[in-house]
Amino acid sequence: MSVFSYELNDHRVAIVTIDVPGEKMNTLRDSFAGDLAEIIEKGRADDVTGMVFVSGKADNFIAGADIKMLDSAKSRADALALSEMCQKAFFEMKKLPFPTVAAIHGAALGGGLEFALACDYRVCSTDNMTKLGLPEVQLGLLPGGGGTQRLPKLVGIQKALEWMLTGKQVFAKQAKKAGLVDDAVPQSILLDVAIRLARAGKPKPRKPRLDKISQLLESNPFGRNIIFKKAEENVLKKTGGHYPAPIAIIKAVRASVELDELKAYKTEAEGFADLVMSEVSVALRGIFFATTEMKKEWKSEDAPKTRRVAVLGGGLMGAGIAHVSAVKASVPVRIKDVAHQGIGNAMNYSYKILSKRMKRRIMSKADVQLVMNRITGATDYSGFKHMDMVIEAVFEDLNLKQSMVADIERECGEHTIFASNTSSLPIGQIAEKATRPENVIGLHYFSPVEKMPLVEIIPHEGTSEATIARTVEFSRKQGKTPIVVKDKAGFYVNRILAPYVNEAANLLLAGEPIEKIDAALVEFGFPVGPLALLDEVGIDIGSKIAPILEKELGSRFKAPDAFSRLIDAKRLGRKTGRGFYKYEQKGKKVDESVYELLGVTVAPRLNKQEIASRCVAQMLNEAARCLDEGIIASARDGDIGAIFGIGFPPFLGGPFSYMDKRGISKVCSELSTFATDNPVFSPAEPLMAMAENGKQYY
């Protein structure tokens, strides 16, 4: 079945509806080019005055290319053919004797936007669900259907690079201001405006709307050289050279202004083919497939929907949870705190984030007010009677959390879920005195809540499946990727993080410099080093989790005693202005006085690769134990949890994918070598068994 349907109006404008049969999203398939050619020929035969493309889907124009199509490319030649096929199909559109218009409502991303770029005009709806972008870089790819060539000519080199190198998605007003679309109008008149453009004839060539400095830079070879050189420097600084796609994008955009058209498009196609076959893109596409697969799990059509939510505690975590509930999930949120100031701070937290979006014209003042109206607060339980879910985000105190369970069971309905944001306390203990333990569950967010994509959902033995399904569904509405983990100390993410951080601390106490340890792990691919991370989380928070892990799981989780000196000295990290680093207005730098406080004499002896290997080895070993104990349901969940929860390098695919690539035997051998100095490195039994049997996780 064709993805296109064709209708001719009274003005001989062809209205072509794009609707992939049986799918929620329109995506570019193998058959797209052939179907498009047939529609264009029909337009020629009917001597149309113009052609308008609209979507038959409610919330997307074309959401991109079908990623599965890329996996079908078994060789570089196959991948090259895919790019050349798209380029050729879109070139044909430019040769037509009549104008073409993309009437965009909903997502026009990746290949979907490349298709729109091949049209003579673009008009989009002002609806918030309308987003345009070329996010291929997030899959380790570049736009392979002419996007690197056409976008710079519309919005300028610098803006095109910014959008493609970050995968940025822009809203209607931004798109119009930049010149990406010719108009942005309410959805009710979108088709009318598109038809009017189709009847206006072919457009005259247009130049990008640039300020004077950008015009000066982009109009001559010397200025362009500065732009491309700076872009490459920034990319290498941010990615550490681990991701080839950004460099390939810069090369293709450069070709669009320095080479003739044929060679420039060839540069794009060859760059695309190389990237499709790269290990990095395979890993990133694997993450995409994993998260897509996870969205199909724990669905329950019968479970009641979560329409009203309360948050206990107006601190940073509570404020963040309230924010994503009001903004992403679009539900009313009631914040309870012991003080009015706590409520005010939590509401102000959301307002500050929304104000930034308003300044960037992503949201209107009315939109901001609409969201803020969803957030209310109280110092008592007024307004809690009809809550579907209550999420607590208070101190790590078991008695306090148990008393809150009792309060919620008294104040709320029988169906109300009590979700604890605890990072370490077993959920079974929190539910111990509950009269409705089936409604109690763990819902562990990561800080800052509005930015971190992961949540751990922790049912205890008595949690009902309906409660799990409802909690999973609501976390997805909040824009989160949930993994369901077993109720055991540290759950999954903190459990694999603790030995990694502990090893970094031990290396520091052995004389390795702070900045060298952190730099080693950043160069390995983590977004921040382990000691900088401890400063961000709060050294006091880490100190509270460590004893719980040690008590439940053994001495390998024992944190260095010397760290108590940091807490005694009120050096808790960024929140107190000092930890391992000193935080000032100009930024942060290592606080040299920490060495004396810890009794450390700086004496470097390891190189950065050795430092990274020791820290990561601890994490891999613990991840293997977690899977063996059923803390996580699968290696896939373990990989997603590590990437989204603690920033394990995505280009490596996650700890389990990384062990497969290195070879389980090699991982065990490295652990055994480290264990000669410290038995805590002894390879986990399940890892040894896999090595002996030549098995892999995938």
Image: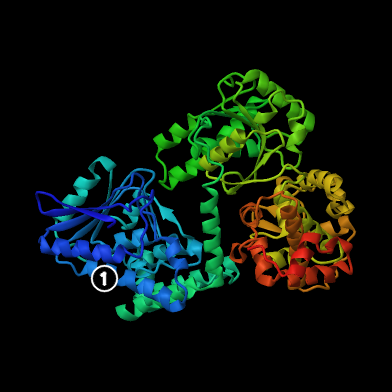
- Give the structural element (helix, strand or loop) at label 1: helix
The residue lying toward the viewer, choosing from 337 and 73, is 73
Q: Can the viewer see residue 97 in this picture?
A: yes
Splitting the image into 4 quarters, where does residue 379 fall? top right
Please name the residue shown 78% across and 32% down the image.
Answer: 398
Please name the residue shown 83% across and 73% down the image.
Answer: 605
Q: Is residue 513 above or below residue 12?
A: below
Splitting the image into 4 quarters, where does residue 608 fall? bottom right
The residue lying toward the viewer, choosing from 565 and 670, is 670
In the drawing, does residue 22 fall left or right of residue 630? left
Q: Residues within 10 Å of mark 1 (few under 14, many from 20)?
A: some
Percent coordinates x, y for residue 356 in the rendering: 49, 45
| Residue under numbered circle 1 | 91
Q: Quadrant of the N terminus?
A: bottom left
Q: Can the viewer see residue 224 in this picture?
A: no
The residue lying toward the viewer, choosing from 637 and 13, is 637
Q: Quadrant of the C terminus?
A: bottom right
Percent coordinates x, y for residue 668 in the rendering: 78, 68
Percent coordinates x, y for residue 693 in the rendering: 74, 68
The residue lying toward the viewer, choosing from 206 and 375, is 375
In the drawing, does residue 262 fall left or right of residue 559? left
Q: Amino acid at mark 1?
A: Phe
Percent coordinates x, y for residue 433 in the rendering: 76, 25
Q: Is residue 177 above or below residue 430?
A: below
Q: Is residue 124 above or below residue 475?
A: below
Q: Is residue 536 above or below residue 234?
A: above
In the drawing, does residue 64 fall left or right of residue 609? left
